[in-house]
Amino acid sequence: MTRFVVRVFDVNGRQYTPPFFVARHLSSPGPGQTSVPVITRILPGVPTDLQADKDTVQLTAGAQAPGFSSETFTVRKQGGRWLADLRAATVTGQGDTVAVDVVDGTVRLAPAVTFPPEHKVKDNPRALLCEPGQGWIYYGAYLTDPTISRLRNPVVFDSATPAGYPSDAVPVKNGGTGHFVFLEYGFTTAAGEPRGPRFLIAVWAPRVALGTPPQIVVFYSPPTKAPDFPGDGYPFLGRYPYDIRAPAVAKDLVQPYPYHAINYLLAGYKIIPQLQAAGRNPIVIMPVNPTGGWGPLDSQLGLSRLIKEVVRFLYGHRLVSSRATPMTRFSLNDGRASIVPDNVFDDEPIPTRWALTVSGFSNGIDHPLNLCTSRPIDEKLYNPAIFASPEEALVDSWREIWDIDGVADDGAGAERHLRNLQTWLRRERRAVRSYHSNFGMRTAPRALVDPARVETRPAKPYKGVAISEGSSADGRATWVHFSDAALQPSAQDPHHTVPLIAFGHAARFPLP
């Protein structure tokens, strides 16, 4: 007979009490008896005696709190120690008493679905589409082992007559280096649940030992807008985020919101391969906003909570590890999102601090700038019990801002751009990396660097090709400006060429 005491907390350490836990186990049979399945209710915080065969019990919150995921997990005694197959559950044993403290989360795997290639899809599938006929990968989210044009650091040309920006071709072998995963953050859409908002979050989970603290890169894209994206209103439970562009056979379908993230991170701008070409393989988090706005994700309170929740989920389910190559994998077999195998037990702690980089492209830079100072969230629309965390974890972990041709989206854009970056840099161990074309707010971040440390190359511009590069005296601010001609060899316009090369350059600097 073993006595269990179960308590549940959120990522902020706040304890809450679901009505009960469900404990499933096999009875411990007596001589000549056969074990049988047993289901027992456990009241949170109330010691309950269980006679479990092989010291193994499966636990689930019987009635989850609105917005929380309440995953099922197994507790087992192995080698004289009690462990859980969910790292978000901490198990301690003293004598015949086992205490289980569970950190519940508000993110979950986004639902997925697959159709035969020629199946006509007319309506919103309300799930992420997987490759037709295979169902093992999201539409378009292939790891293609690309060759990255890595901008040189420093930005030095081979000759005085260059044709474009100086780069080196770097092949990236990214098969097996990580998992691209979509998560839902916030309330569920299950029948009978409160109609609260939820957001689609794209995440890269590296399959390498991340070390301590783990590196995290958050990316804010330009905001989604109609007519390119299906419009939706609060609480964004209709067309956002899974509606299709138009009815079509499955093999030709496009989901604008999910593909927005796939295009930036993998298929088009190749942010993740750029980071890998630079020698980094961090956790990458990209919120995909509904056309109605960013809600709490535009504040320190909201981003702090999102990062905590994603870290809890990835570490809790062993998709990432600070110590070793992760033991579990993300699966989309037959279009069903899952993590395999289950019943993997260890006691690696979930990090509470990170080495954080926040990046923004074009007017997506508004959000890193907003995060530089404390801002409230609308608590009437976004329950802080789900969407907020104390700001300290974010502020103390934040090490870099990457300004990728940022265009501040207000009337005093240049002044705000510079003022917020200057204020943010006052703390130690912080750095700003800025990259600008003639389109971006190039005059503002230039003031962060020492004019005496700015060099234009080639010394005499050739057919309009010129790149200026500078830094502050302490190296914590760097700035690169490209002439349009320096970016024209790309098939993209100059503004949209900058993110094709800037991430791989910024990632080559050591963390401050």
Image (cartoon, rainbow, N blue to C red):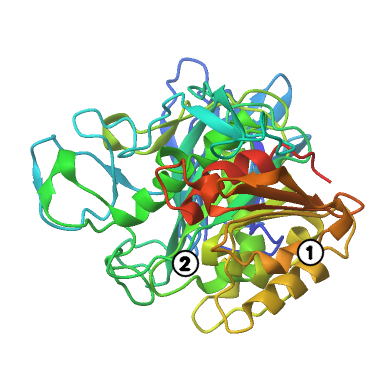
Q: Decide: few, some or many residues near mark 1? Use Cα within 10 Å; few <14, some 14-19, many ≥20.
A: few
| Disc 2: which residue | 66
Task: Give the farthest residue toward the top.
Answer: 32
Drawn side of residue 308 relative to residue 138, left or right: right
Q: Earlier in the sequence, mark 1 or mark 2?
A: 2
- Residue 307's label in the rendered image is none
Give amino acid for label 1.
Answer: Glu
Within 10 Å of the Cα at label 2, are there few (<14), some (14-19), or many (20+) other Cα atoms? some
Q: Are marks 1 and 2 in contact (CB under 8 Å)?
A: no
Where residue 116 appears, as percent x and y from the top left, is 13, 35
Note whether 6 is above or below 378 in the view shown: above
Looking at the image, which is closer to me, 508 or 13?
Answer: 508
In the image, taking residue 175 as reference, residue 226 lies left or right, namely: left
Q: Is residue 195 visible?
A: yes
Query: Would you place residue 78 above or below residue 262 in this image?
Result: above
**What amino acid is found at the position of numbered circle 2 in the picture?**
Pro
- Indicate the quadrant where residue 372 lies: bottom right
Quarter of image, res 9: bottom right
Q: Which residue is mark 1?
A: 392
Q: Quadrant of residue 451?
A: bottom right
Callout 2 secondary element: loop
The quarter in which the N terminus is drawn is top right
Q: Position of residue 493 (x, y in %)?
A: 43, 52
Q: Secondary structure at mark 1?
A: helix
For the question of whether residue 318 can be seen, the reply is no
Q: Is residue 115 above or below residue 401?
A: above
Residue shown at the point (21%, 53%) measured from the top left: 125
Instruction: Pick the residue in front: 302 or 157.
Output: 157
Q: Is residue 95 above or below residue 438?
A: above
Where is residue 415 drawn, in percent x and y? Answer: 71, 78
